[in-house]
Every structure is written in C-alpha cells, then in structure tokens.
Amino acid sequence: MRSLLAAIGTLTIVPFNHSMIASERDLGRSVLFFPLVGLAIGAFLMGMAQLLGPIVAPAPLAALLLAALTLLTGGLHLDGLADLCDGLAAGGGRPRILSVMKDPHVGAFGAIGLGIVLILKYALFGEMIRRGWLTSFLVMGLLSRWAMVLASFLGRYARESGTAQPFIGQIRWPPCAGATGIALAFAWFLLEGVGLLAASLVFLGVLVFNRFLESKIGGWTGDALGALSEMVEVGVLIFISAAQGLAAG
C-alpha cells in the first residue's frame, strides 16, 4: 500500500506525503504502479471528455483537458522539459548543462520547448475528441509513465544527489518487469496491435534517449524523466492518430 501511495504522490498532486510514509525502498518499488497511475490519469481525461463532450466544442474541451492534466500533475514534467531544453541549448560540458538545468528560471529555449509541446498536445487532444478516439488518453497515460520506469531501470543518475535518486539506477528488475507486464497487457487490451506497436516504439525511444543523455550529461535527472514523459505523451498520440487514420482510410 505504501508503494502505491508513493506512486500516486510522485506522479500527481493528490496529497499523499510519500516522503513521510514511504522509505527509499518503497519509492523504488512504487514504479510497479506507475503505469496504473498513468492509466488512472488517462481515465480522468477520458471521463472529462465523455462528460463534457456533448456540451463543449472539441477545441475548448481540448484546452480544458490540457489544463486539467497540467494541474493534476502539478506541471512537474513540463518544468522538467523546460529545464532540459535550456540546459541542452546552453551547450558546453556536463557541469555547464547540469548547472543551467538546475536554474529555476525558464530561458528562451525552455519556453520554445514548452510552447511546441503544449501546441502539439492541444491539437492532438482536439483530434482525439473529434474522432472519438478517447481510449487514446488511457494509452497515453499508461505508456508515458511506463517509459519513466524503463528509463529509471536502464539509466544511471547524472547528479550526486537529488529528488530522483531513489529511482534512477536503483530500480530492480522485478518491479520493472511487473510494470512492463502491466503496460503491455493494457496496451493490447485497449488497442490490440496498435497498442503493442506503440509500446515497442516507446521502448526504442527510451533506448535512444538514454544513449543521447549519457553522451551529454552522463545519465538521467528528474528533469530528464519529466521531459521523457511529456515527449512520450505527444509521440504516442501522434502514432495513434496516424495508425487510426490509416486504418480508417
């Protein structure tokens, strides 16, 4: 139970003080539940779309869903995306990039990265609503949080200390395998072959991004995990949109 509460408290603003109720061991085990928490986040968005769809047009409804997702997650992953964009754009060696990423201010490239992701999400949310592909929200939440588990298992921590230290490089294979089984099972249940293909592409994407970060900063940070989640959310929706469009055409 403590591991489940830790997963909820880590990925959302639901008021569970996981640092008080869970040890580092519990936090490491909590990744088993990351895909389920992501699924619940997607279900929340899907429920909003079903409830408000009959009375709100797709464009404003997409904006409402985007705002709800940002509030539910506390905007932490978006903040991580901005920090990573600023750090990578600053260039220089590993110390320079990590230093810029730690700066609480958002720079020009961070703002550009945020703008691109938010515009893409808004457009994709609207497309899912107009087409009635609301199951896509479930798959988006499921696979984006599973990607964080994969990255934590495969990668190493780029800093000496930090909030993500209990996760990155500390995950044992049983919870990672369990999270993977959950992700693949639900991906198949929700979208069958399209879901499994999306999961395969997410896995490949994590491998590529892991290699890239190792070459730039020596591994992962909490900001990088947040950025990964945002990019996977967008990537999964783009893939589903393309796959469903081809199937319909």
Image (cartoon, rainbow, N blue to C red):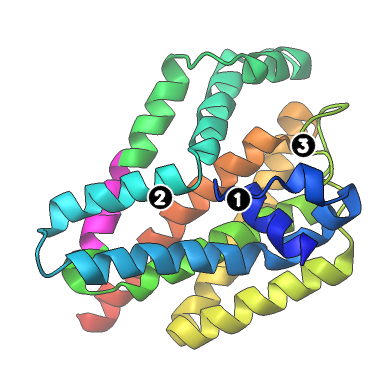
Residue topped by disc 2: 69
Q: Which is closer to the viewer, label 3 or label 1?
A: 1
Residue topped by disc 1: 11
Sooner in the amino-acid sequence: mark 3 or mark 1: 1
Residue 144 vs 13, above or below: the answer is below
Amino acid type shown at disc 2: Leu
Helix, strand or loop for disc 3 = helix
Residue shown at 65% from the left, 62% from the top: 34
Amino acid type shown at disc 1: Leu
Residue topped by disc 3: 214
Residue 158 spot, x, y in % from top left:
81, 31
Q: Which quadrant holds residue 95?
A: top right
Helix, strand or loop for disc 2 = helix
Residue 216 spot, x, y in % from top left:
72, 28
Q: Nearer the viewer, residue 43 or 112?
A: 43
Q: Nearer the viewer, residue 113 or 190?
A: 190
In magenta, the rendered stretch is: 119-127
CB under 8 Å between discs 2 and 1: no
The Cα–Cα distance between marks 3 and 1, rounded to whole angstroms, is 24 Å
Q: Is residue 168 left or right of residue 206?
A: right
CB under 8 Å between discs 3 and 1: no
